[in-house]
Image (cartoon, rainbow, N blue to C red):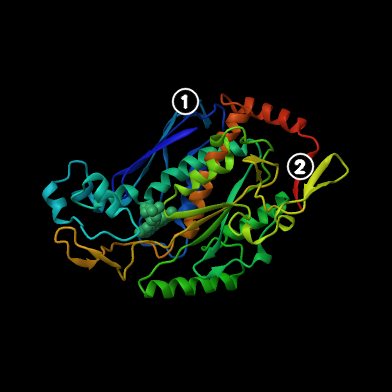
Amino acid sequence: MRFLTAGESHGPQLTLIIDDVPAGIPLTAADINQDLQRRQVGYGRGGRMQIETDAATITSGVRCGKTTGGPIALTIPNKDFAKWTDIMAPDADPDKARDKRFIRPRPGHADLAGYYKYDLDDLRDALERASARETAARVAAGGIAKALLNGLGIQVASHVTALGPWQLDITQHPNPNTQATWDAWTNTIEGNDCRIAGTQADVDSLHALIDTVRTEGNTLGGTVEVMTTPLPPGLGSYAQWDRKLDGQLAQAVMSVQAVKAVAIGRGDDGATLSGKDFHDPIVPTGNGQLARTRNHAGGLEAGVTNGMPLLLTATMKPIATLRTALPSVNLDTGEAEAAHFERADVTAVPACGVVCEAMVALTLARAVMDTFGRDTLGDIQAAHAHHLARCQPAPTGWN
Ligand SMILES: Cc1cc2nc3c(=O)[nH]c(=O)nc-3n(C[C@H](O)[C@H](O)[C@H](O)COP(=O)(O)O)c2cc1C
């Protein structure tokens, strides 16, 4: 299941082509649009999200509500294009575009990198493609991967675990070891615009924090945790470096705009624990099953799933476009000048969680297909059931 995205932030539309999708997966645009809308929410986002109401139009690979086995193509229009046509249309007047060019690179964004790499005369070419607007197409691809995973009873969710100085109280960290606790946990997260599993007081204090930072012309980063329901044991492999699922997940999530660290389980602070306190004891439950007393491994040992839920944390750096602009240079004159500013998010950590979910779902869908087959959902379900029957004693999650 590989995919390509195309499109500029203020161009006419985003385009996705996703190939190697098994046949027979129930799929409608509505399934995809749900996640597109979740990507748009989040306290601290800029005005752009009020303009867009992202919705996908599927143009191939789905018939009568089911995937056909052919490549799926879809588009997501950019409503904002209407205001940018004069400089963003493929046949826009180059003189007009040149009048509006920008040449003061923003530290932390793609501007200077694009200038050196592609010999740009207008840094907008870098901004437009590097922008996280592209993540809408990734989220659409993730929706298709989630539809396959749902066919095996696997669900993927995410929540914000830190935002600037705020950190989730660890006692409120969910352990969704039953469907009821999973549902309660995800309802709490999706029920607030910071996408946290905290209290209303936490949400209020985050709103106040973001408002203050906005007034200062500054921005915030944070961390998100992606969590799944228990995964079938045996996805991934330790037999070769590039088949290790932890490595594949890290690459996929690290590729998300502004993500600068990826940790599996307690991978980020594990160095502070001894082996006795880090590793997850294996406890036979006496009824042909086994449990773990915790999930510090985050569901992966040796790059292979161990039957536990996946826990993956991604760290997002603060947004690079600052209203109180950082020192930069005018690339025409070589003189010191403040960096370019244009409408931006104060923070996008809640949305980043939805994007990371998509990248995790796509990586897991590939691992599922490597293990259980690629042609039809029915074949994959049969192989999955056979595999679970032979995995004895069966892992039951953590308590
Ligand atoms: C959901 C989301 C929204 C983002 N919104 C902005 C934004 O409004 N302004 C900005 O400068 N960067 C934003 N970013 C981050 C930039 O796209 C990113 O920093 C830039 O492409 C450079 O890539 P790098 O940070 O991975 O090095 C956002 C990232 C994500 C995931």
**Amino acid, disc 2:** Pro
Is residue 183 visible from the viewing direction of this image? yes
Q: Is residue 107 left or right of residue 192?
A: left
Image location of residue 219, percent across then percent down: 40, 67
Is 211 located above or below residue 126 in the figure? below
> In the image shown, does 219 or 17 lie closer to the viewer?
219
Q: Work out how far the residue at label 1 is from the one at label 2, CA to CA, in angstroms.
A: 35 Å
Image location of residue 268, percent across then percent down: 58, 57
The image quadrant in which ligand 1 is located: bottom left
> In the image shown, does 1 or 37 lie closer to the viewer?
1
Where the C terminus falls, by quadrant?
Answer: bottom right
Is 364 located above or below residue 71 in the figure? below
Query: To which residue does mark 2 refer?
Result: 395
> In the image shown, does 118 or 82 lie closer to the viewer?
118
User: For the point 29% across and 60% down, which residue is it?
Assistant: 106
From the image, state whether disc 1 or disc 2 is nearer to you.
2
State the SS at label 1. Answer: loop
**Amino acid, disc 1:** Gly
Q: Is residue 264 left or right of residue 79?
A: right
Is 377 located above or below residue 183 in the figure? above
Quadrant of residue 288 within the rendered picture: top right
Image location of residue 367, percent across then percent down: 58, 35
Query: To which residue does mark 1 refer?
Result: 70
Image location of residue 136, percent across then percent down: 42, 47
Q: Is residue 390 left or right of residue 44?
A: right
State the SS at label 2. Answer: strand
User: For the point 60% across and 66% down, which residue is it?
Assistant: 168
User: For the point 28% across and 64% down, which residue is it?
Assistant: 341
Disc nearer the start of the sequence (1/2): 1
Quadrant of residue 167 within the rendered picture: bottom right
